[in-house]
Image: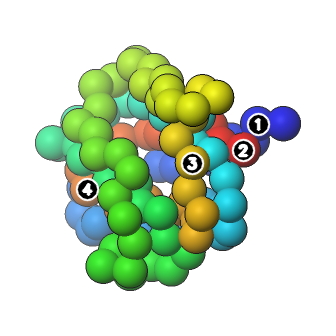
Amino acid sequence: MAYYYQLSVTASVPNKTTIKTGFGKLKGIFCSSASTTPRVTVYDSATQTAADGTIISLLTPQASENYPLSGADSGIGFSRGLYVLTTGTMELTFIYE
């Protein structure tokens, strides 16, 4: 079963978010709004220390765009956790298992 996590970010400070710990699969990212040079870096990490994980996706999202992620069995697997670092102003929805 797929789950979602909604994230609203402002440009004033980078946002560090752990969405899920442990094994899983990132299925896609939807950006409903974006401005102020948005950037999303997704790590396979369980902690809010980017240096602790492997980058599994790097994105400069556009407003009203869906970014489905494909890989083995539709999605990108992670083993330690789903950790996201964002800069800029945006509204995002992460779809994961």
Q: Amino acid at mark 2?
A: Glu
Distance from Cα at disc 3 to Cα at disc 4: 23 Å
Picture coordinates of residue 19, whole percent (x, y): 60, 60
In what element is the residue under mark 2?
Answer: loop
**Label drawn at residue 77:** 3
Picture coordinates of residue 49, whole percent (x, y): 38, 81
Which mark is first along the chain, 4 or 3?
A: 3
Q: By what rule are the colours in the image chosen?
A: rainbow
- The residue at the point 33 percent across, 23 percent down is 63
Residue contact between numbered discs 2 and 3, judged by CB atoms under 8 Å: no
Distance from Cα at disc 2 to Cα at disc 3: 9 Å
Q: Is residue 2 left or right of residue 29?
A: right
Up-down relation of residue 13 to residue 36 (above or below): below
Q: Is residue 97 left or right of residue 5?
A: right
Decide: few, some or many residues near mark 2? Use Cα within 10 Å; few <14, some 14-19, many ≥20: some
Kindly identify which residue carries mark 1: 2
Q: Amino acid at mark 4?
A: Thr
Kindly identify which residue carries mark 4: 87
Residue contact between numbered discs 2 and 4, judged by CB atoms under 8 Å: no
